Amino acid sequence: MIQIKNITKKFPSVTALDNISLKIKEKDFFGLLGPNGAGKSTLMNLLVGYLIPEEGEILIDNLKISGESLSIKNKIGLVPQSLALYDDLSALENLEIFGSLFDIAGKQLKESIDEKLNSVELYERRKDKVKTFSGGMKRRLNLIAGLLHDPLVLLCDEPTVGVDPQSRNAIFDFLMKLNEEGKTIVYTTHYMEEAERLCNRIAIIDMGKIIAEGTVQELIHHLPYEQTILINKNQTTLHHTEKFKSYGILIDEQDHFELKPAEGFTLSSFFKMIETEGITNQSIGIKRPSLEALFLHLTGRRLRD
């Protein structure tokens, strides 16, 4: 569906994307995960032809993206990070304008608008001006504006920025339903939990480079350990840090330690040790590997550092 081949994009002061390549299959829910400034939005702008790369090419549905490729742009829906709405117009009037940009009119446009407004629970507010909407309602309206022409591919550039949990969940449910119905979705985020919840495949991007790609489980297998041991800080555990270090890498967090087990680590030997030293099981927890841990392992820093 989407082929990104050796793309490099430079700006005067920075190389935003550095020779990246990706393949996104039809019906994928593909996540681009990385911190702010990693190059995610630049890649989205390249995918819709707003920007042109210095090197490489992008194909969507076997058609090359360029600044003049209007035919392929009609197959793409974009949900930008910045709201693209007219505050002084109603939700209905906004969608009529966006529909006209794709030459949709009459009964076809009305049916598409009604369906999309119902799908994000905004139909009853269709005649209200957008400036009266909450941030979450605006995000939902922004989302369906990119779907009126039923594109092959939907590009979502951090579509839940600044929204309340209820609206975020509504957006998630709507996007997952779209994907289940066969829509190919490319989704950028710097929230680990969003990527893990939504995406069947993920590429981690940092400083303009793809540093890992695969399913969540495939990515986590990049980690040299299978699990993390959480150790509460208390008078007993603080006296046994050297013992803990003999089992792996001990990271000192604000209110607890995290133990990254060394090769050959077994839970049975570890729990035998804490029993011998008089440390209660209530002081110990086990955390499964996560994309946050993977990002820290690959880059040496946390995602939001």
Image: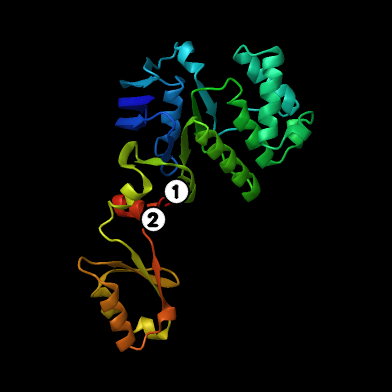
Q: Report helix, strand or loop for mark 1.
A: helix
Q: Residue at x 41, y 29 (%)?
A: 43
Q: Which mark is residue 290?
A: 2
Q: Is residue 123 left or right of residue 55?
A: right
Relative image position of residue 35 (x, y in whole percent): 42, 44
Mark number for residue 196? Answer: 1
Q: Is residue 289 above or below residue 153?
A: below
**Label 2 secondary element:** loop
User: Can residue 233 be seen here?
Assistant: no
Q: Are marks 1 and 2 in contact (CB under 8 Å)?
A: yes
Front residue of this view, candidates 130 and 261? 261
Amino acid type at image mark 2: Ser
Residue 124 is drawn in which quadrant?
top right
Q: How many marks?
A: 2
Does 131 sit left or right of 280 as displayed? right
Q: Residue furthest front?
A: 181
The amino acid type of the residue labelled 1 equals Glu
Q: Nearer the viewer, residue 143 or 20?
A: 143
Q: Where does the image place residue 248, in percent across and percent down from the top left?
A: 25, 69
